Image (cartoon, rainbow, N blue to C red):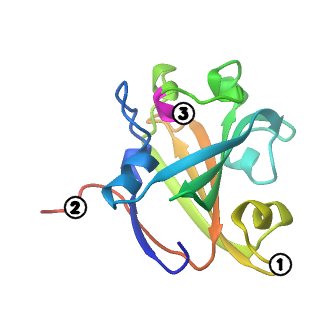
Amino acid sequence: MSGDAWISETAPYLAPRAPGQSDAWTDEAARRGRRGGQRLLRAGETDAPEGIGAALGLPPGERVVVRCRLILLDDHPVELADSYYPVSVAGGTALAEPRKVPGGAVTLLARLGYVGAEVVEDVSAGLATPEEREHLGLSEGSAVLRLLRLTRTADGTPMEASLMTMPAGRHLTYRLGKQGS
């Protein structure tokens, strides 16, 4: 997808899905006549990576639940998406298990009483790590964009920190809220 413009609305990614409804990425790709998918690479408890624990407001050394996914567009890798949750939020739930979560993480979190009300996104760029190069099919020395999305509940509780890593050649526009007709 390198070089393609892609306008993405964040709001659908925060809304719980109705029973039988596909995930937001699959829907977004289908609206453009494309096929979106994802492959779960790993899930479970882990030590919080540098910056993630702080974003979630956790004390140093606190563990998190992580779900690492390879995001596909027309069966080609376009993004790595690693979602981190405090153990107090996701520990012992399907999010900590290496399997598909019916309705997706947002739907499960809503059932647990965690609904996203505020999103803060931070974009940075850097060289791809060996793991990022392998999964995204990039050559050594390739740059990537990293978007860290922190989602909080209405009372300010951090519930999810998602790190999305994509090839730097992409142009992304994120639209928040409803646009006028």
Residue drawn where x is 75% and y is 79% of the image? 142
Question: Which label lies toward us, 1 or 2?
Answer: 1
Residue type at mark 1: give it. Glu
Q: Quadrant of residue 137?
A: bottom right
- Give the answer, above or below, for where 127 lies relative to 34: below
Give the labeled residue for mark 2.
179
Q: Which mark is residue 7?
A: none
Residue type at mark 3: give it. Ala
- Residue furthest to the left in view is 181
* Magenta stretch bounds: 103-107
Callout 3 environment at 10 Å: few (<14), some (14 to 19), or many (20+)? many
Mark 3 or mark 2, earlier in chain: 3
Q: CA distance from mark 1 to mark 3?
A: 33 Å
The image shows residue 163 at horizontal and vertical percentages of: 65, 54
Callout 1 environment at 10 Å: few (<14), some (14 to 19), or many (20+)? few
| Secondary structure that dominates the magenta span | helix
The image shows residue 70 at horizontal and vertical percentages of: 65, 51
Q: Is residue 172 left or right of residue 163?
A: left
Question: Which label lies toward us, 1 or 3?
Answer: 1
Query: Is residue 139 among what the camera can see?
Result: yes
Q: Which mark is residue 140?
A: 1
Mark 1 or mark 2, earlier in chain: 1
Give the labeled residue for mark 3.
105
